[in-house]
């Protein structure tokens, strides 16, 4: 899987090392000295290639998010072209947005797994500048996908859909974060073995996400029924 744009060998080593360390320790606890030691580089190399720790973090996210979001938009383009004027099926939209990320999380050789775990950690421990940066990076893709979902689900209030999408992001993030809660809830050995199976995870998570998207509206979000007006 090609998820990283070609860059210099030193830059690549620094980014790979930063990705692993940020994923393991968080942004604040990871120092540039830790990163350069892991990358077998020096502080001057970080300053030369990136300029600062914040710029390094931004480039770390940009090199993979650019590819990830391009894949998502390309998938949605194909679906909308095939659908013509009709709405794209909700299941297809879910698969276009979340499926690419789930497959990326299964990439243990190219670094996709580390990145998706780092991204999941970022959702729960967001530094302010990272949160703002991610909002800019996601702006185009989220606008396109929200429009597709709104068209496909006209009976779901937009505010309610946004809550559901928020929960869907949380479920995906937790599933790919590496958290081992499957043991805590008393799963059997067969379930623990399948927890590391990318295909099984994809099938289960997609089924869960689509089920949540199609769940009955909560009472407060349901549209009020139209009652006949009493004659004056």
Image (tube, rainbow, N blue to C red):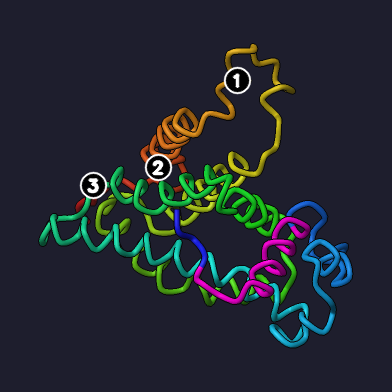
The residue under label 3 is: 89
**In the rendered view, does 68 fall on the left or right side of 225?**
right
The residue under label 1 is: 193
**Sequence-earlier tag: 1 or 3:** 3
- Which numbered disc, 2 or 1, marks the residue closer to the eye? 1
Q: Residue at x 66, y 74 (%)?
A: 11
**Sequence-earlier tag: 2 or 1:** 1
Compared with 52, 11 (above or below) is above
Disc 3/disc 2 C-alpha distance (Å): 12 Å
> Alpha-carbon neighbours of circle 3 within 10 Å: few (<14), some, or many (≥20)?
some
Disc 2/disc 1 C-alpha distance (Å): 28 Å
The dominant secondary structure in magenta is helix
- Which numbered disc, 3 or 2, marks the residue closer to the eye? 3
Residue 198 or 109: which is nearer the viewer?
Answer: 109
Quarter residue 2 falls in = bottom left
**Residue 213 badge:** 2
Q: Is label 1 in a helix, a strand or a loop?
A: helix
Residue range in magenta is 5-22
Magenta stretch encompasses residue 20 = yes
Compared with 205, 124 (above or below) is below
Q: Is label 3 in a helix, a strand or a loop?
A: loop
- Which numbered disc, 1 or 3, marks the residue closer to the eye? 1
Magenta stretch encompasses residue 158 = no
**Sequence-earlier tag: 3 or 2:** 3
**Which quadrant: the C terminus?**
bottom left
Q: Are marks 2 and 1 in contact (CB under 8 Å)?
A: no
Q: Is label 2 in a helix, a strand or a loop?
A: helix
Disc 1/disc 3 C-alpha distance (Å): 33 Å
> Alpha-carbon neighbours of circle 1 within 10 Å: few (<14), some, or many (≥20)?
few
Residue 8 or 208: which is nearer the viewer?
Answer: 8
């Amino acid at each position: 899987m090609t998820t990283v744009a070609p860059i210099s060998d030193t830059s690549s080593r620094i980014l790979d090392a930063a990705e692993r360390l940020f994923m393991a320790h968080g942004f604040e606890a990871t120092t540039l000295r830790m990163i350069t030691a892991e990358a077998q580089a020096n502080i001057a190399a970080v300053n030369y290639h990136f300029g600062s720790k914040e710029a390094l973090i931004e480039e770390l996210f940009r090199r993979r998010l650019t590819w990830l979001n391009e894949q998502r938009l390309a998938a949605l383009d194909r679906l909308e072209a095939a659908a013509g004027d009709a709405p794209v099926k909700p299941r297809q939209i879910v698969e276009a947005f979340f499926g690419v990320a789930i497959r990326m999380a299964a990439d243990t050789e190219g670094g996709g797994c580390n990145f998706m775990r780092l991204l999941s950690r970022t959702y729960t421990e967001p530094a302010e500048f990272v949160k703002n940066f991610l909002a800019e990076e996601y702006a185009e893709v989220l606008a396109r996908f929200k429009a597709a979902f709104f068209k496909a689900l006209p009976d779901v209030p937009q505010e309610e859909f946004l809550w559901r999408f928020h929960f869907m992001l949380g479920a995906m993030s937790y599933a790919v974060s590496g958290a081992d809660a499957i043991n805590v809830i008393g799963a059997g050995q067969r379930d623990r073995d399948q927890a590391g199976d990318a295909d099984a995870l994809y099938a289960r998570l997609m089924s869960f996400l689509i089920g949540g998207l199609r769940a009955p509206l909560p009472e407060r979000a349901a549209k009020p029924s139209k009652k006949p007006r009493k004659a004056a």
